[in-house]
Image (cartoon, rainbow, N blue to C red):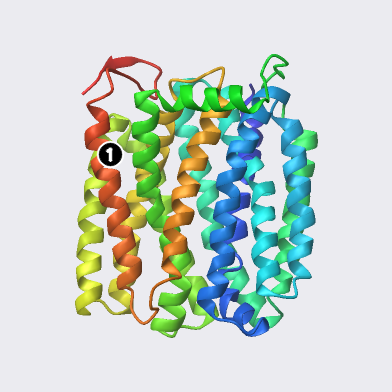
């Protein structure tokens, strides 16, 4: 593969990966406007975010087998077309219930992009490059929380929240065209792969029974849930507790994303000296300590706006470091059924994230303590899973493709 081809392939995969997050981040500043439009509360609007997460999680399980049966591109076409249709539907929503339902269906369409991009990394690039490619995808993905909420804030302030879904429709059309004309098919369709429920469930179970898969998939997912809680809770915390404007919120969100982006790239330097397992353990330990301090400080009122931003920044740095290493270690043992493994990993990550984000809507929005408490709880679970799971792994397939003695 030429350098130019390499670059454009990674760029398209990154765009596919970023479609879901962009769909989330762009409309966050519009929560108060959406609530006023539908005569409801911001907490009720946040359910449309949780429904999006649930849709992505369920869609992962749908597209995984389809990607292994029909190749990567055909299911991708269907998913992107569904996304475009439902984005138009979101523009014409007349109630919060309609928006919640359409966001759920829109997510099912968008998750085809995420699952396919993850599987295609495993298809196209050497195993030893996977962690680096994942980190680069996170760099592109991380640009969405820098650009999307800022754009969303200005769009909401100048025009109307409906225009956000016009922009998302246009982006999806451009990505679909890039996939059609510039992205190679990376996996030959397998007509022997059964789409009957029993073989599909068996395939998922075989993947999940791999100790390296369930250890790093679950630990990574619970750690990553802190990011979902932040995304769901930040409109309430910043715009209702600290009373910042929609434009200011967009800039805060964009600034905080630097922690997530920067740490994922620093990870490339860390990998030259440390193993992925070591990086995950250290970053998760720091995340646990940070979230415990955050929840105690939020309860006792130690942190104002600046302190809250700082604690979230540290959390995002940890998540950005953990994510590429956990993804690489989770998928490393698989080749033929990489699509199924990628789908199951995504379903776990997004499903747990959806539950964590949904829980934010049930708490009083007068304090950051509920958000901080959920972050701390999910991080503690991740830490315990990592400690226990590492004992079950006999040999670890590392990002370089080598086998090493387990813990």
The answer to whether residue 349 is visible is: yes
**Residue 231 spot, x, y in % from top left:** 47, 63
Q: Nearer the viewer, residue 377 or 73?
A: 377
> Which residue is denoted by mark 1 in the rendering?
385
Residue drawn 68% across the image and 25% down it: 195
Residue drawn 36% across the image and 34% down it: 216
The outermost residue toward the front is: 198
Local SS, label 1: helix
- Left or right relative to 364: residue 163: right
Residue drawn 49% across the image and 55% down it: 354
Q: Quadrant of the N terminus?
A: top right
**Residue 153 spot, x, y in % from top left:** 59, 75
User: How many dots with numbers?
Assistant: 1
The answer to whether residue 116 is visible is: no
Counting other residues with Cα less than 10 Å from the Cα at mark 1, is it few (<14), some (14-19), or many (20 or more)?
A: some
**Residue 14 spot, x, y in % from top left:** 59, 42
**Residue 283 spot, x, y in % from top left:** 27, 45
Residue drawn 57% across the image and 75% down it: 31
Placement of 7 over or under 24, stated as above or below: above
Q: Quadrant of the C terminus?
A: top left
Q: Nearer the viewer, residue 32 or 170?
A: 32
Q: Nearer the viewer, residue 261 or 202?
A: 202
């Amino acid at each position: 593969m030429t350098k130019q081809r390499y670059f454009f392939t990674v760029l398209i995969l990154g765009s596919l990966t970023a479609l879901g997050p962009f769909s989330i981040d762009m409309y966050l500043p519009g929560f108060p406007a959406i609530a006023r439009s539908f005569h409801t509360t911001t907490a009720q609007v946040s359910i449309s975010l949780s429904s999006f997460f649930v849709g992505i999680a369920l869609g992962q399980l749908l597209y995984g087998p389809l990607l292994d049966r029909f190749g990567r591109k055909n299911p991708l076409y269907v998913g992107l077309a569904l996304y475009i249709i439902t984005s138009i539907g979101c523009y014409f929503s007349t109630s919060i219930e309609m928006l919640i339902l359409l966001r759920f269906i829109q997510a099912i369409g968008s998750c085809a992009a995420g699952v396919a991009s993850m599987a295609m990394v495993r298809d196209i690039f050497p195993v030893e490059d996977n962690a680096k490619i994942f980190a680069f995808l996170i760099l592109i993905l991380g640009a969405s929380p820098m650009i999307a909420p800022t754009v969303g804030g200005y769009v909401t302030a100048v025009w109307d929240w409906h225009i956000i879904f016009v922009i998302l429709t246009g982006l999806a059309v451009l990505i679909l065209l890039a996939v059609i004309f510039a992205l190679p098919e990376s996996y030959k369709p397998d007509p022997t792969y059964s789409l009957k429920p029993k073989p599909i469930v068996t395939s998922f179970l075989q993947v999940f029974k791999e100790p390296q898969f369930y250890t790093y998939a679950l630990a990574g997912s619970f750690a990553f849930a802190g990011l979902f809680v932040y995304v769901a809770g930040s409109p309430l915390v910043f715009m209702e507790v600290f009373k910042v404007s929609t434009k200011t919120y967009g800039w805060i969100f964009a600034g905080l994303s630097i922690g997530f982006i920067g740490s994922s790239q620093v990870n490339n330097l860390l990998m030259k000296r440390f193993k992925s397992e070591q990086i995950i353990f250290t970053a998760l330990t720091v995340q646990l300590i940070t979230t415990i301090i955050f929840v105690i400080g939020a309860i006792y009122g130690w942190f104002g706006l600046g302190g809250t931003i700082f604690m979230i920044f540290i959390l995002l740095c940890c998540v950005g470091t953990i994510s590429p290493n956990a993804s690489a270690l989770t998928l490393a043992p698989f080749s033929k059924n990489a699509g199924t493994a990628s789908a199951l990993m995504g379903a776990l990550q997004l499903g747990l994230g959806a539950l964590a984000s949904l829980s934010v809507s049930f708490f009083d929005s007068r304090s950051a303590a509920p958000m901080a408490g959920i972050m701390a709880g999910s991080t503690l679970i991740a830490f315990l899973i990592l400690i226990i799971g590492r004992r079950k792994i006999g040999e670890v397939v590392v990002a370089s493709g080598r086998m090493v003695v387990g813990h």
